[in-house]
Image (spheres, rainbow, N blue to C red):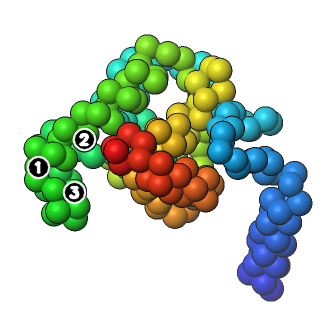
Amino acid sequence: MKKVNLLLFLVGALLLGVSLLYSGDLDVDHKYSEEVNISIPVGRNYNYADILVKRVVDGDTLLLDSGERVRLIGIDTPEMHESAKLHRDAKRSRQDINTIQQLGKQSYEFTKNLVQGKHVSLEFDVDRYDRYKRLLAYVYLKDGTFVNAEIVKQGYASLLTFPPNVKYADLFEKLYNEARENKRGLWK
């Protein structure tokens, strides 16, 4: 009987959460147009506010002043350094290793110019850490710029969606398609 009550409670809580999400109480009204507004959603809870980005490791990974590494959720940039992923990227894209590394350097430079030495806020999704113990986060500059989205919008990242961290997957897909269609960044 206790298991049935617990199950009913969990189902009820899930339904309440979904209804709040779709009623707009938990979501933000994003307006998509040629000029996409990608800024901090009002009313979000940020556990990591005003954190300094000490160094950009690569196009999708940051090192915070605290020593923690942050992997940007929802995006993937080409590899710059020798790794198994570099070879997978080359094989998948039918590009040579040097080309992939050059594209990785372009993504790195874009991300570095965007966030290195700046203070950011982090927003988390369902999973907070990846298997490498990096924080998984959506990153925002103090001026409200949504870093993950800006990298995709400017054409310096592909999509990398790992459920359950899918909060902005639709936005990222829209920005990715626009970047490719408009030949921005790596898609030139």
Q: Is residue 123 above or below residue 4?
A: above
Residue, disc 2: 103
Q: Is residue 177 above or below residue 77?
A: below
The residues tagged by marks 1 and 2 sit, at their Cα atoms, a distance apart of 10 Å
Kindly identify the amino acid type of the residue bearing the numbered disc 2: Leu
Residue 97 bears which disc, if any?
1
Other-residue count near label 2 (Cα within 10 Å), few / some / many at <14 / 14–19 / ≥20: many
Q: CA distance from mark 3 to mark 2?
A: 11 Å
Q: Distance from label 3 to label 1 (Cα)?
A: 8 Å
Q: Nearer the viewer, mark 3 or mark 2?
A: 2
Q: Position of residue 29 (x, y in %)?
A: 80, 48
First in sequence: mark 3 vs mark 2: 3
Q: How many numbered marks appear?
A: 3
The answer to whether mark 3 and mark 1 are in CB contact below 8 A is no
Q: Say which element carries label 1.
A: helix
Q: Nearer the viewer, residue 181 or 140?
A: 181
Task: From the viewer's side, name the closer residue of 5 and 45.
Answer: 45
Quadrant assignment, res 121: top right
Residue furthest to the top: 117
Q: Using the rendered image of the protein, determine whether residue 72 is visible from the camera's viewpoint.
A: no
At 79% from the left and 66% from the top, the residue drawn is 18
Q: Which mark is residue 89?
A: 3
Indicate the quadrant containing the C terminus: top left, top right, bottom left or bottom right: top left
Q: Amino acid at mark 1?
A: Ile
